[in-house]
Amino acid sequence: MVEAGAHYQYMANTLQLNNGMGSFSDIGNMAGMAYTDWSWASLLVDLNNDGLKDILVSNGIKKDVDNNDYRNKVKNLGKNATAEALFQLSKDTPSQPISNYVFRNEGDMNFTKVTEEWGFDKPSFSNGMAYGDLDNDGDLDVVTNNIDDVAFVYENKANGNFLKVKYQGDQNNKFGLGARTIISYKDKQQVHENTVTRGFISSVEYGSFFGLGKETEIDKVEVFWPNGSISSFEDIQANATLIAKQSDAKLNSQENNTTRTFLTELTAEDLGIDFVHQENKYDEYQTEILLPHNVSQNGPFIGVGDVNSDGLQDVYFGGAAGQSGKLYIQVSEGKFVANTSQPWEKDAASEDLNSLFFDADGDGDQDLYITSGGSEFQLGNPLLQDRLYFNDGTGVFSKSRSALPNILQSSQTVQASDIDQDGDLDLFVGTRLIPGRYTFPATSYLLINNNGKFTEAKAEQAPALTNIGMVTDALFSDIDNDEDDDLIIIGEWMEVKVLLNTNGFFEDVSKVYGLDDTRGIWWTITASDLDGDGDDDYILGNLGKNNKFKASEEHPFKVYANDFDDNGTNDIVLAKYYKDDYVPVRGRECTSQQMPYVAEKFEDYHSFASSKLVDILPEEKVEDAVVYEIKSFESIMLINEDGKLRKKSLPNEVQISPIKSILVKDVNADGHKDIITVGNHYGVEVETTRYDAGYGAVLLSDGNNNYKFSRPQSSGFYVPYDSRDIVMIDDAENKESHLILVANNNRKPTLYKITK
């Protein structure tokens, strides 16, 4: 359907958040209202007069013709079924009344289900739903129609203050339909459009209603009429009805003020960067049907370094499997040209992930290390060999075939530090995954530099690296301020790991730093002294809160992985807490495709849906399985203080999607370090809404580890793509500015300029 031009189809509600840039972000999962059964009407309405729009949803289907067991009965009738059999089957169609839903808006994109508390819990087959102040007491009452039953009328007994606006339009639009009203009071603002067609085949009361809570006065009311004129009112008292007449409105003479933004978007091609990432097609769901998301589309990444020693930073973009990466040289005019030396073209079959410019052989220039990864290639495939290209000092590179040990694993991240303090740079290489064995922990390793030739460090030098997990990112940082680099490692289904360096030997001290129960779907980590106290703090990108896999301290989200049916493939079972025990996230159909014994053990969908996880998986296989649990998917900061890392959540505006890369930079020149993030992850299994709600974010610091989201209209930063990496380089044309490059999966990079 998508290839034919239609949209992605999902069995879930959406709550579309207007980004103000001509696009919307679906935050239904984060708001907790993505799944409300068979739903019809949805109303955004302030029911408790607190100034925030609550959400009502009507539910119920008289004949549940989509019940899978019922559909199987229909399918099994055959062509010769009698009229009596068909009639009996129609009478036996499942029919179960269910309650409507109501969600109270708590602010900051948080909602609480209050169906019972607010009296909407009576089971019914509801369709249409409408609201209006039926008793004219200053709050909105609700009416719901029901199939084969009387209507529900809900009297609202809210106590907050309010303002009503009634519209008198011109003779062709007497009710002023389409008028848009903005009210402003203190530091708050509300917006309402005068449209009566809301809900499912329903119409609400004409006019606009604004709940005010305890506020008693509105500073300003502006009505924007469809013809472009404006009615304006000031100092309006609460608990009143304001009459807005289009005949009294004035033409809009206001000029559009252009706001100066912190960042300005540039066109990559205009600066000479014509690279376009081209993701190769690979279907890992053929062997691992129950994967929560793909692990084959983790690039591209960007490497930054001065390869020709001219004082200007150059950039390397990694390619997908079957596509060569490309190195661009920055020239003095602030533009880029493709380097004449591109020896990695011969290695295009490999999947480039992270790349690192560093002086590998001690000759004073920047060599290039590229990790080879992806899930397309099995362990031992030569295409998984990482690569090291030596620089002759002028930007001409040649591949070394003997500098690296023969390690054929799917790696992703590489970081450099003088681990043994002998004056050259050694490496940490993080293994991303074991192909075909999702969640199984992989072994990462240290590479010790001996005059440009690298050897794998012995296991006792860093024992925690053995089977450490699915590493996505890492960094060297002197966490304890003892003048050597320690190692912090994160990954998918991993806890945050701190390995303390003592004379080149690394000890896992994660618990000492308070990092128990930090397992997550971690993508990226960045270090910076955010609070100016002389040590590194850390920012970590997680899956985010806008996902269907709910996790909490009381009821963690779990995964079980093993060959549960002994057929030679890895079976992944995601599990959530439901009612009083854990159940599989995926249904009978998908689960039985991965593990055929499930369809034999559970002959119908009802028996599977009624079973607990312990009833489905073989007990002896569970004992040998990889089992992890996650208590939070939030992206966080770790503030380094008093020998501990204190967790602090990032604002909700960046929790709407996975964060894949983070940059720290004072973008508004106030002396405080701000945060720029990019993310999303489009590649998911068919029953999961793809992670596409993110559009990049700028978080402004107040200098006390508090961050406030800057809307893209103010920041100028808007990247609504499947982004993977963000880097900053100096601008050759203007020493007072910097260029921000964002690498996006399966499309061209995005480019911005920061000017002081």
Image: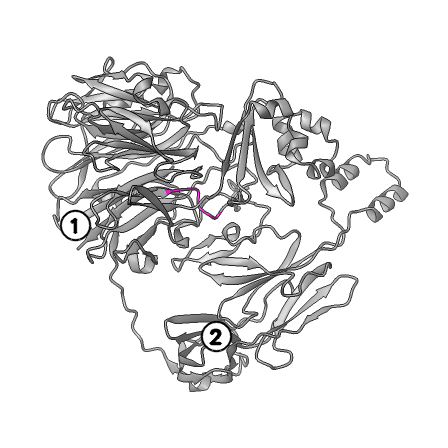
For the record, the magenta segment spans 541-546
Q: Which residue shows up at 74% across the image and 35% down it?
A: 604
Q: Amino acid at mark 1?
A: Ser
Whether residue 30 is visible to the viewer of this picture, yes or no, is: yes
**Which SS type dominates the magenta stretch?**
loop
Amino acid on which disc 2 is placed: Ala
Q: Which disc, if any, is residue 179? A: 2
Q: Is residue 408 above or below residue 320?
A: above
Screen quadrant of the C terminus:
bottom left
> Is 530 drawn above or below residue 392 in the view shown?
below
Q: As drawn, is 466 to the left or to the right of 624?
A: left
- Residue 203 counted in the magenta span: no
Q: Is residue 322 visible?
A: no
**In this rendering, is residue 602 above or below 700?**
above
Name the spot of residue 116 as percent of width and height, x first.
65, 61
Disc assigned to residue 322: none
Nearer to the camera, 345 or 644: 644
